[in-house]
Structure formats: structure tokens, C-alpha cells
Image (cartoon, coloured by chain):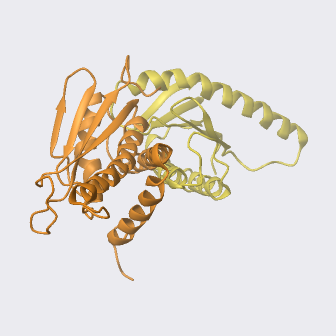
Amino acid sequence: MVGLATFMIVSREDVPLYEADLGKGIEASSSAAQKRDDAAHLHQFVMHAAQDFVEERMWETNGMYLKLVDRFNDLYTYAWVTAGGCRFLLLHDARNEENVRSFFDEVHQLYLRVALNPFHTPRTPIENEVFDRRVRQAARRHFP
Amino acid sequence: MASTSRPSVSASAMSYLLLVMVRDYHEKGKAGKAQLEEMGAQLGARLAERYTKDRPRFTEHTEVVLWTCKEFWQETFGKRVDNLKTNNRGVYVLTDVAFKWMSGLRPFGGDTEEESWALMMAHADSYGAFAGGVVRGALESLGLRCSVSQEPTSQSAATATSIEEFKPLGCKFTVRLAAGLGFGGVA
């Protein structure tokens, strides 16, 4: 199970399309829930800040996987950019670039299915439950 | 079925769909053409997303245009663009001498040869509008804001109608990149 991770998809025009907290399951005590809430806010903040680095790094390479783009204390931000300019960001507390790459690749496939759906309006948030489920499954599979 | 080939769409199903669609929107005149173009743009954007999945990202306008003329055209229209011209100031002309989507078009309907020919060319323009939209959608989704106009062309003599004399229609697409466009992911 992923220790601490949040995953986000941002479109080319900086519209957030999807966000998921992939961390461990909800614990019973309320203080733990409170801590998770704070952590979630911090994660979001760190990822938004990392976008500047993503934009810089985008121009330095023509590969899709940008690997590690930013680091905040013990939180690492990895990024993947599609040819269409859509960005995937993953905030993780471990350093394992290859797992992240295969995770991004799989999510790219899932994202494509959503994008190809004629009933999905481009550049709008992805509310598809199947997509959400599959992303979480992929996370569990790639980050055991 | 132990098939490992890529899923594919029946070409004839695609032709029939195009035929009915273009015919319906053609009757709506100018508005119909605009709608066809917009539908094409949405399709083109999706196709481009899909076809660029497994290749490195683009770093220059020209790379995008070249990819469109080769890989994209091959996947979408069954062949590569036959000729690419540019004025090096943001205008590209892509020429396809035998455009697949117009391959079934023949002069039809009118009382005279000229009328039939004109009807055919008018329909070809609607096909071209849809295809132009596809090209625009693809280019825009890869960062190149542009406008695309179409011009169906014919290699046959002006009023040739017999099967032997008639050569399939082609199409010329003119792509005009938006002014002041720095190639960028943020349009």
C-alpha cells in the first residue's frame, strides 16, 4: 500500500482534471483523520508549487517522463507530460523512479480511454468512477 | 478469438457514416459546414492524443507539421501527404492528390455535366471541411493554434464522367498558424 501519495492530472491550460489521495486507508480515530486532512492540504499545495518546475523541465527534454521535478522535505514530486501537454503529477514519500514510470504509463492509457470517450468534454474534470477505481488499483499494484 | 491484431474499424462502415453525415450537414449550408468543421476538430484532438501516446513529445512547430503529414495522415487517411509547402512564416500547404475520404465521389445529380460536376465539388468541399477540422483539432491539441482551410482538387479533365477517365479527387489543406505563436504547451 502506498505510504503517502497524491496523484493529480492537470490539463494543458492548467485546468485540474483529477485528483486522488492514494494513501493508506482511513483510520478510526478522529485525530488521525484530522492529520490526514492537513496532510492532504499540504500535498495539494506542494504539487501546485511543483508545476512551475514541471513547466521548466518540459522544455529540456522531449521524453514524456520528467522523473523527479521537485522535492519538499521528504515529499518527492514526479511528473509525466503527454504530447498534448496534459500533466500527471505524483507526490510520493519514497524514491523509486521506475515504479513511478510504469504507474504513469498505465494511467496514461486510462486517461486516453477517458479522452477518447465522445461523451467526455475535453478539459473538464474527470468524474468517471471506473477511471478512479482503475487509477487506485494501478497505484496499489505499482507501489506495493 | 486468438487475435493479437489491433482492433480496427470497417472501412466501409466508416465510408457510409461519413457519407450520410456529410450529406445531412451539407444541406444546412454554411452553418452545416461550420458544424462539420467543429466536429472534425473534436475528433482530430482525440486522434492526436491517441496517436502520440508512444512517441516522444514535440519540441518544434515543424516537427508537429511533419508528424501530421506522415504518421497522422497515414493512420487517419490511409496514406501520407503527397506534398508539403511552406512560406516559412506560419503558412503550410498540405496536398493530398487522392484523398481517401473523397474516393467515392463522382459527378452526380445535375441536368448537365457541368451541374453534376459542380454538385460533386460542392460536396467535396463539405468533406474537406470535416477533414480540415480533423487536421485543425490534431494540430491544436499538440500546441499549434491555427486555422485550416480546404480546397478539393481534381486531376481529371473538367467534365470527365466515365469511370476510365475520372481520377479520384484530391484535396489541398492550407494551415495558417495563429499569429505570435511561440511554440508552447500553454496555448
- Placement of A36 over or under A127, stated as above or below: above
Extreme-right residue of the structure: A30
Q: Locate residue B99: give its quadrant.
A: bottom left
Q: Is residue A6 visible?
A: no
Q: Residue at x 17, y 33 (%)?
A: B85
Q: What chain is colored orange? A: B
Q: Nearer the viewer, residue B11 or B167?
A: B167
Q: Is residue B121 left or right of residue A114?
A: left
Q: Position of residue B124 (x, y in %)?
A: 31, 53
- Placement of A75 over or under B68, stated as above or below: above
Q: What chain is colored yellow? A: A
Q: Is residue B15 left or right of residue B105?
A: right
Q: Residue at x 44, y 34 (%)?
A: A67
Q: Nearer the viewer, residue B52 or A46?
A: B52
Q: Position of residue B174 (x, y in %)?
A: 28, 35
Q: Is residue A106 visible?
A: yes
